[in-house]
Image (cartoon, rainbow, N blue to C red):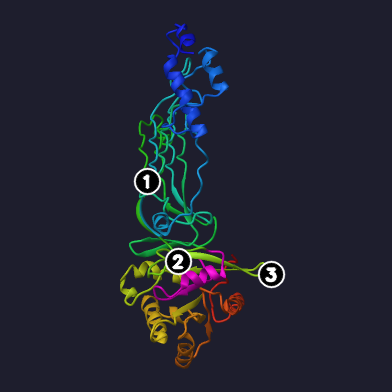
Amino acid sequence: MLATLSRLKSPRLLSPEIFLGYILGQEVRSKKVSLLSHSLPVSAAVRQKVTAGSRDVSSSCSLCAKVRGQPKKRELSEKKLTRCFVDHRRVKLMAGSGGRGVSSFHSEPRKEWGGPDGGNGGDGGSIIMKADKFVKSLAQVVPIYKGEDGQPGGSKNCYGKNGSSYYISVPVGTVVKEEGEAQADLSEHDQEYLAVFGGIGGKGNRFFLSNENRAPMTATRGMIGQERVLQLELRTMAHAGLVGFPNAGKSSLLRAISNARPAVAAYPFTTLNPHVGIVNYRDHEQVAVADIPGIIRGAHLNRGLGISFLRHIERCRFLLYVLDLSSPEPWTQLVHLRYELDQYEPGLSLRPQVIIANKMDLPEAREKLENLKSHVSQRVIPVSALTGQNTEELILHLRELYDGYLQGEGSGEEKPKRW
């Protein structure tokens, strides 16, 4: 076999030893033959490839290439979701500057004194923020934006091209602030906010033509575009918000009543970012429920990223207090939660609400539930997010709160947008 291949003397072909090594190696891999065996089985097809000549040999053949399958999409972990989800950005916006005007005079045969014909420069491009319901985070917003400058004017009364406006897509629910003061609230899809204006283009000498000045030489430069430093804050848009201390079972409860799949683990602060789940009803109505990360005592003083968590509750129209029945005194949790909400925004804890007693599957939960009802005057719904016990009652009461809010009961604000 090697003698047959050695007769070929073309310098551009592979040597027979290298080619035979590739063929035998592929045959060993396909047949799963051990390299320690006494004999290597070579099929007739392999021998035919070797003895037929080496004109079919190519260094880029499929035998030398790796077989790559389609990569499988893996679900993002909570750690990676933390990197992808951004709810606060500080951006510097610089609009485009206007183009300069031109000073020129028209001249052609038999018309040497045609007069001024310098055109104006184009206006600079503005930067506009636009709410997009398909954008879920501020992660794609970069720190600096620069608008397009206007083109300079030309002779023969040619005006310069205006700079194109630049649109920044932000999630629905983004609040634009400047030095701590709110400038815009992008709470609707396709809502726009003109953040910075582009500079006005300069004037050519044709603009200054008058009866008193028949040959103006003046041309002005374009104005510099507006510059601003803005803070963008994303506040979760949801009808109801799950409020509770860490490890109270909020994420498990959201998984039990909606289609959301937040991370669940047996340690506190599992949820690092808000998750929104949709509760579907038979009449095709949908209620959005937000899983707010756990709040600790002193959250209004920005302890444990408390301000970052509390600002997401401002959008919620009614609150679901989730209490942990495994704690010694669950009713004290309710007192501390209301205190933190009122310290952040006065009257926030007075919105329509319901108290959820979670972890009813524990042995001591029944006795603590009776003590909890004796300390509070509101309705208490006992549930178990782990087993799904009594979640139907919670879903029905959630619909009652939603219908009452649609009718404007207890709220003078504008009616909510349906999900």
Kindly tell me whether residue 156 is visible in this rendering: no
Q: Secondary structure at mark 2?
A: loop
Amino acid type assigned to the residue bearing label 3 in the image: Asp
Magenta-tinted stretch = 236-260
What number of labels is visible? 3
In the rendering, at what x and y percent does residue 311 appear? 41, 69
In the rendering, at what x and y percent does residue 2 appear? 46, 13
Q: Which numbered disc, 1 or 3, marks the residue closer to the eye?
A: 3
Above or below residue 281? Residue 364 is below
For residue 337, which quarter of the picture?
bottom left
Magenta stretch: includes residue 294: no
Amino acid type assigned to the residue bearing label 2 in the image: Val
Q: Would you name the residue on which mark 1 appears?
A: 225
Magenta stretch: includes residue 239: yes
Q: Earlier in the sequence, mark 2 or mark 1?
A: 1
Say whether marks 2 and 3 touch (CB < 8 Å): no
Q: Which mark is residue 264?
A: 2
The quadrant of the rendering that contains the C terminus is: bottom right
Q: Residue at x 36, y 34 (%)?
A: 219
Q: Secondary structure at mark 1?
A: loop
- Residue lying at the far right of the rendered structure: 283
Q: Residues within 10 Å of mark 1 (few under 14, many from 20)?
A: many
Q: Secondary structure at mark 3?
A: loop
Q: Which mark is residue 147?
A: none
Amino acid type assigned to the residue bearing label 1 in the image: Gly
Q: Would you name the residue on which mark 3 appears?
A: 283
For residue 49, which quarter of the picture?
top right
- Residue lying at the far bottom of the rendered structure: 374
Closest to the observer: 349 or 372?
Answer: 372
